[in-house]
Image: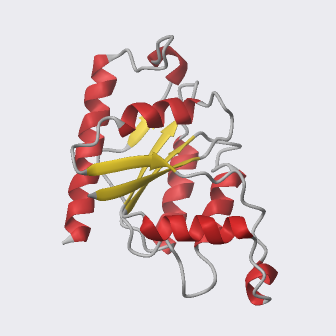
Amino acid sequence: MAKVGIILGSLRKESFSKKLANNVAALFPEGYEAEIVEIGNLALYNQDFDDENNAPAEYTAFRNKMKEIDAVLFVTPEYNRSVPAVLKNALDVGSRPYGASVWNGKPAAIISQSPGNLSAFGANHHLRQSLVFLNMPIVQQPEAYIGNVVGLLDEASKIKDEGTVEFLQSFVNAFVDLIRRYQS
């Protein structure tokens, strides 16, 4: 069983990232368990916490949870042409203390989404830069930029466009292939 942690770049209870992530989680094959990992409760990263051996309990819980995860799917909007602060903070919390990064070697995939046409292209690429530094192999193709997300979802928050579902299935299949390469 492979555990896929889904990290959302949006904290809104009705976030499009969460709705999209729930749709994508259902596309993983048998033997893959996908679950959303909470990051909204993490205090802003401060190295003093680790240096003084006084990390908040939320840091410890998050780090321990991520150690159990085999791969990470990031689903995010774009804020000011970059990643939301909550997402960057989670990356920072997980990468410390120095030498104990929970991200090292974990396969990753990124879906960026937007209600507009640009589909959070900037966030997707800024996040890729951080993940390269964190030594996370990333799905390169297909790239997943989901624009006009509002129009893709029905009243039950299900994707109503079959072409989008097929594309996301091909994206999940590529991610599963990457996970398998790194598990063996």
Residue 41 location, x and y as percent? 72, 54
Q: Is residue 13 above or below residue 91?
A: above
- Residue 12 or 143: which is nearer the viewer? 12
Q: Position of residue 61 (x, y in %)?
A: 62, 66
Indicate the quadrant containing the C terminus: top left, top right, bottom left or bottom right. bottom left
Residue 146 appears anywhere in the view: no
Q: Quadrant of residue 91?
A: bottom right
The quadrant in which residue 98 appears is bottom right
Please tell me whether residue 17 is drawn above or below residue 83 in the rendered image. above
Q: Total of numbered circles in the picture?
A: 0
Q: Could you tell me residue 146's position as x and y percent?
A: 45, 32
> Of 165 and 147, which appears nearest the observer?
165
Residue drawn 64% across the image and 83% down it: 97
Residue positioned 74% across, 77% down in the render: 55
Q: Residue at x 78, y 81 (%)?
A: 54
Q: Position of residue 130 (x, y in %)?
A: 54, 65
- Determine the residue positioned at 73% across, 83% down: 50
For this rendering, which residue is in front, 142 or 179?
A: 179
